[in-house]
Amino acid sequence: AQKITQTQPGMFVQEKEAVTLDCTYDTSDQSYGLFWYKQPSSGEMIFLIYQGSYDEQNATEGRYSLNFQKARKSANLVISASQLGDSAMYFCAMRETYYGGSQGNLIFGKGTKLSVKP
Amino acid sequence: DGGITQSPKYLFRKEGQNVTLSCEQNLNHDAMYWYRQDPGQGLRLIYYSQIVNDFQKGDIAEGYSVSREKKESFPLTVTSAQKNPTAFYLCASSPTPDSYEQYFGPGTRLTVT
C-alpha cells in the first residue's frame, strides 16, 4: 500500500535562509508522481511542485526545488531564501500512474509546519 | 475570475442532522474531489467524480453522499451516519481525471455538536 511519511511535525528557519522539508514514500509501483502542497492558515491548498518518477532532473519552481532520490524513496522539498510568507503547513503527496496513463488517488502525508523567523 | 468556491466557510450543525456542503467550479474541469482534513493530519479522499453523473468512493466514504448533476457542481452531504463529522472539508478539481495537478477550494470548516 502507498504511504507518505513526513517526520518533521514542525520546523523553524531564519528569514532568507534555505530549509529542507523531508518526505519519504513507499510504493511498489514504478510509475508515480510526487507533489508538494502549501497550506496557509486560511486553509486552501496551494500546489507548489511536481516530480514524475521517470523524470531524471529534479523539479524546480522558482524558490522551490524537489530533491528526488528514487533509490532512497525520498522527495524532499527545498525552499531557498525563506520569506515570512512561507510560514505554513507543507504536505507531501503521491499519486500512482496506472498502465495507460490513468491516475490513482492522491495520498497525503501528515504535514510539516514551517515557521519563518524574522 | 476562474476558480473553485466553497460555501459557507464555517458551518455549525446539531448532531443527527444532515448537512450539505457546496462546491462550485467555473474552470470547466471534468474531475472533482472531496477531501476531509482532521487536525494534525493530511487530507483523506471521501469521494471523486471523473465525469458528470458518475462518482466513485474514496478511502473514507462511509457516512457521506455526493451528486454530480452538473459539470460545475459537486455537493457533499454529511449524513447523520457519519460518526465524527467535525472536520475541515476541501473540494478540488482537475482538468481531466488524468491531470496530475488538482486545484483546491478554500474549504469549509464543519462543527457538529
Image (cartoon, helix red, strand yellow):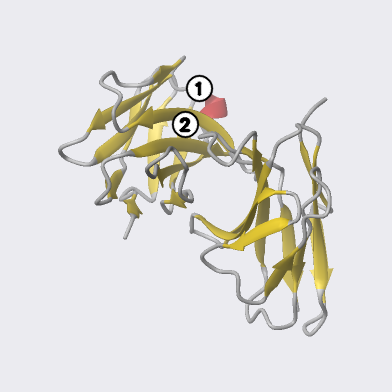
Residue tagged 2: A116
Q: Chain of mark 2?
A: A
- Secondary element at image label 2: strand
Residue at the image point whose x is 43% and y is 29% from the top: A50
Q: Chain of mark 1?
A: A
- Secondary element at image label 1: loop
The picture places residue B89, in percent across and down from the top left corner, at: 67, 57
**Residue furthest to the top:** A62
Q: Is residue B83 above or below residue B65?
A: below
Residue B75 visible to the viewer = yes
Q: Is residue B89 left or right of residue A117?
A: right
Looking at numbered disc 1 in the image, what kind of residue is underneath it?
Gln
Q: Earlier along the polypeptide chain: callout 1 or callout 2? A: 1
Residue at the image point whose x is 54% and y is 34% from the top: B99
The picture places residue A20, in percent across and down from the top left corner, at: 32, 31
Q: CA distance from mark 1 to mark 2?
A: 7 Å
- Of B39 and B19, the residue lying toward us: B19
Q: Is disc 1 in contact with disc 2, using a CB cutoff of under 8 Å?
A: yes
The picture places residue A75, in percent across and down from the top left corner, at: 30, 36
Q: Is residue A110 left or right of residue B48?
A: left
The picture places residue A67, in percent across and down from the top left corner, at: 28, 27
Dividing the image into 4 quarters, which one contains the N terminus of chain A?
Answer: bottom left
- Of A35 and B8, the residue lying toward us: A35
**Residue furthest to the front:** A100
Q: Residues within 10 Å of mark 2 (few under 14, many from 20)?
A: many
Residue tagged 1: A83
- Of B49 and A50, the residue lying toward us: B49
